[in-house]
Image (cartoon, rainbow, N blue to C red):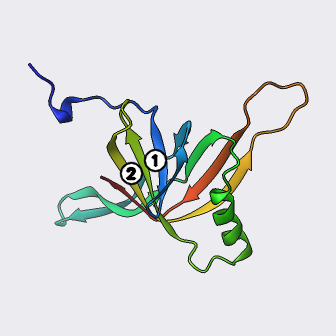
Amino acid sequence: MPARDHDADFQGSFFSLVIDGMKTAFFTKCTGISIEFDVINFKEGDGKSVIARKRAGKPKYSPVVMSRGFTQDQELYKWFNGVATGQDTKPYKTASIVLHDRKGDPVATFNLLQVWPSNLKVSDLKAGSDDVMIEDITLQHEGLAWA
């Protein structure tokens, strides 16, 4: 029986970050794509019995951390610096984390709304080390949509 599109398993090893429609780069690691709701507990009853009820409250979105090998591309740094210095009058962006298949075609997208960078760091420097330098950017956001 041939596989249907929704039967395919996705690999989490090929993904890129797109900010306001501009592809920034492929990354080697991404953590924090999640949404969680506060739980509202309340009791309801008719005087004879009481039932504990739960309802979804406000959503909470985890920070997303993207990692890649250090590059000379300074677009993420410019965005971070614009937020840090207050020079960026529109620091909030729309970002998409795009999963790609082995051919490079997009297969799934996570859209992040009202995104701004809260942390930018590079790996530690150490004489005698052969480790590849890694650059991390932490993104705060106010919405997550699977597309």
Q: Residue at x 19, y 66 (%)?
A: 47
Q: CA distance from mark 1 to mark 2?
A: 8 Å
Where does label 1 land, which residue?
33
The answer to whether marks 1 and 2 mark residues whose Cβ atoms lie closer than 8 Å is yes
**Element type at mark 2:** strand
- Residue farthest along the right direction in this orientation: 127
Q: What crowding class fits label 2: few (fewer than 14 Cα within 10 Å), some (14-19), or many (20 or more)?
A: some
- Residue farthest along the left direction in this orientation: 1
Badge 2 amino acid: Phe
Residue 57 falls in image quadrant: bottom left
Badge 1 amino acid: Ile
**Element type at mark 1:** loop
Where does label 2 land, which residue?
110
Residue 124 falls in image quadrant: top right
- Residue farthest along the bottom direction in this orientation: 89
Q: In the picture shown, does residue 51 fall above or below 67?
A: below
**Number of the front mark, 1 or 2:** 2
Residue 6: assigned label: none
Whole-percent x, y for residue 52 in the image: 28, 56
Residue 40 falls in image quadrant: bottom left
Nearest to the observer: residue 121 or residue 77: 77
Q: Residue at x 32, y 60 (%)?
A: 56
- Residue farthest along the top direction in this orientation: 1
Whole-percent x, y for residue 113 in the image: 43, 64
Quarter placement of the N terminus: top left
